[in-house]
């Protein structure tokens, strides 16, 4: 792939829509509501990190990028 397509010709977007929203709600509101939360809940709130890492290792800083975040 890298032989035929230069990274500057590739546009990328990563996103999961509303994926992880329930985990994010549990993470932030769990303490206020005195609810127990799992220890690994942070990784459930960021499910698009793996896809972002893979595309950035190929594309780098080239091309247009759209990264919607829940921050």
Image (cartoon, rainbow, N blue to C red):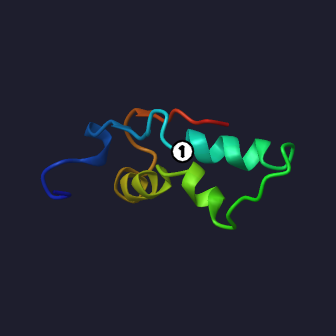
Instruction: Locate residue 66 relative to residue 46 in the image: left or right.
Output: left
Residue 25 image offset from top left, x and y in percent: 68, 40
Instruction: Locate residue 18 relative to residue 70 in the image: left or right.
Output: left
Q: Residues within 10 Å of mark 1 (few under 14, many from 20)?
A: some
For the point 67% across and 63% down, which residue is it?
A: 38
Specify the farthest residue to the left: 4
Please name whichever residue, 3 or 41, is drawn nearer the observer in this view of the structure. Answer: 41
In the image, residue 60 above or below residue 10: below
Q: Quadrant of residue 63?
A: top left
For the point 32% across and 36% down, which residue is it?
A: 11
Please name whichever residue, 50 or 25, is drawn nearer the observer in this view of the structure. Answer: 25
Helix, strand or loop under label 1? loop
Instruction: Locate residue 66 relative to residue 28 in the image: left or right.
Output: left
Q: Quadrant of residue 62?
A: top left
For the point 49% across and 34% down, which residue is it?
A: 18
Q: How many marks?
A: 1
For the point 54% across and 44% down, which residue is it?
A: 20
Instruction: Locate residue 71 relative to residue 56 in the image: left or right.
Output: right
Point out the image quarter for the C terminus.
top right
Residue placed under numbered mark 1 in the picture: 20
Residue 21 image offset from top left, x and y in percent: 57, 39
Please name whichever residue, 51 or 6, is drawn nearer the observer in this view of the structure. Answer: 51
Point out the image quarter for the N terminus.
bottom left
Q: Quadrant of residue 40?
A: bottom right
Residue 6 image offset from top left, x and y in percent: 24, 47
Residue 35 image offset from top left, x and y in percent: 79, 52
Please name whichever residue, 52 or 43, is drawn nearer the observer in this view of the structure. Answer: 43
């Amino acid at each position: 792939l890298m032989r035929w397509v230069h990274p500057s010709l590739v546009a990328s977007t990563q996103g999961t829509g509303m994926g992880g929203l329930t985990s994010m709600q549990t993470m932030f509101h769990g303490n206020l509501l005195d609810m127990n939360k799992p220890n690994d809940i942070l990784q459930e709130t960021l499910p698009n990190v793996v896809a972002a890492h893979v595309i950035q290792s190929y594309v780098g800083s080239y091309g247009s990028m759209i990264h919607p975040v829940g921050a």
